[in-house]
Image: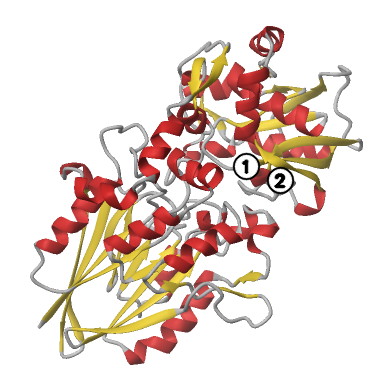
Amino acid sequence: MQKITFLMTSDTHGYWLNLPNKPEQSLLNTVATINHIKENADHPIVSIDLGDFIQGSSFATYCSQIAEDGNIFARAVNEIGYDAQIIGNHEFNFGAEYRQVILDQVKAPILCCNIVDAETQEPALGEAYKIIEVAGVKIGIIGTTTHYIPNWELPQHYEGLAFKDAFETTQYYVELLRPQVDVLVVAYHGGYEKDLNTWEPLEDLTGENQGARMLQEIPEIDVLLTGHQHRLINQQVGKTWTVQPGYAGERVATVTVCVENGEILDLTGELHDTSKYEAETNFKAVIEPERTQGEAWLNHVLGEATLDVPTTSVFEARLNGIPFVELLNQLQLAETDADFSAVALINDSFSKFTGPVTNEVLLEVYPYYNRIAKVQVTGQDLYEIIEYDLEYLVVNETGEIDVNPEYVHPKPRHYNYDLFSGVTIKADLNQPLGQRIQALINEKTQDPINHDAIYTLAVSQYRAVGGGDYKNYTKDKIRFISEIDIATRLREALANYTPEQWAFINENYIHVEWL
């Protein structure tokens, strides 16, 4: 009998300095965990990274936007010694050139079966699959990536590429490889759209996540490795073992397979908590000099934000607005000269954006590289956009306003709720979905929004191309996309805003009336 362990990381997001809200931890703890597993194994290990490894942390933004060099991420995965590298959706965030320079330096085979050359229809980012022989056992590894990327990204970031349906393409290659191998692994940068016990949908079945369908309809898969949703999953479904290791290296997943005469006798999985292992300090040399240079840049004070923080509750901030969100909206309005603006409060770090603000704080409160878009909408579009937006909120059993559980489980999606400026929203959350708006008032004219009139709205590029499944944002409605990203405009505000501008924001940040 032969025993083989598949070791997997995913969604590490460049956290080589420290983890979000865990300053004492970093991916150095993840490396230590991987090394411990390898050093204590008495059988072969096949290691795979599932992508989203060049974007996400403040440090990753420093590398892409300031140093303009992502070599560190290739060096890191090369030193870890993965046997395969999968493509994540966030590999597209900083454009094709930045992505490709990094991928060209990765020594492990890049596996991605469903992102293809638009002309030839052949895999464009590496190979579709890899067959290896380990201890006499033939193993097939298929790499696949959520095909939903065009719903989030600027077209120039995937020019020349086509995205085939991840499920259908995976199914094709499973049928191709199954007769050739003893163990078949699918490494899928995507998650589960249904509960794995009841098969009840956990989200709208858009195709973004198809892991549950793979488990239901492709039983020939022995091991399904997943990511993207940042969930902690370790479960056998039928004869398939599936895992997902969370976010920022918080877990390392392993699935151990026992094989005899070409048949699998046993499957077991485990999620290894990386906080239990001391940081691998010897690995620091691999990520220098960028680590030291990045820390210095991140600690640099940009300026003073004279913003009030009326609440430290992120829920109250989303419910009623806060000056920080108003600042973002004002920057978007200034960039686009739009009628209205909408922006999401991405996380709960907003209270740090007052007083002296460093580069690290700025990128903590606004971590994404988003440019500003101006979209043209009808009044009817605006009504439908805001009605969809309001689905984030519900009235709970005690009669209080609360977050819709669908935006919390299985994956938190608070970033899909926008706060508006330039339009006053009067809404009754006790009314049925789609009928909650009682009035929308143009704050410039104090006139009701006309369903048939044409307006312009400033949003992030992510939202403008349909991110968050807003049906009324479509690419044909985009009239302008800025060359400068939102974080850069925040830096400029810290340097140039007058006391009068800060005062205006502190006094004019509420644009909703709950009826």
Around disc 1, counting alpha carbons within 10 Å, would you say few (fewer than 14), some (14 to 19), or many (20 or more)?
many
Q: Which residue is mark 1?
A: 370
Apparent side of residue 233 relative to residue 109 in the rendered image (left or right): left
Residue 130 in percent (x, y) is at: 38, 81
- The foreground one among 237 and 306 is 306
- The foreground one among 82 and 62 is 62
Is the residue 137 above or below the residue 159 in the image? Answer: below
Query: Which amino acid type is marked by label 1?
Result: Asn
Residue 408 in percent (x, y) is at: 45, 39
Q: Residue at x 74, y 46 (%)?
A: 472
The disc label shown at residue 326, or none: none
Query: Which amino acid type is marked by label 2?
Result: Ala
Q: Residues under labels 2 and 1: Cα distance? A: 11 Å
Q: Residue at x 59, y 60 (%)?
A: 97
Q: Residue at x 61, y 17 (%)?
A: 323
Q: Residue at x 83, y 42 (%)?
A: 376
Around disc 2, counting alpha carbons within 10 Å, would you say few (fewer than 14), some (14 to 19), or many (20 or more)?
many
Q: Does residue 430 appear in the picture of this structure?
A: no
Callout in the foreground (2, 1): 1
Q: How many marks?
A: 2
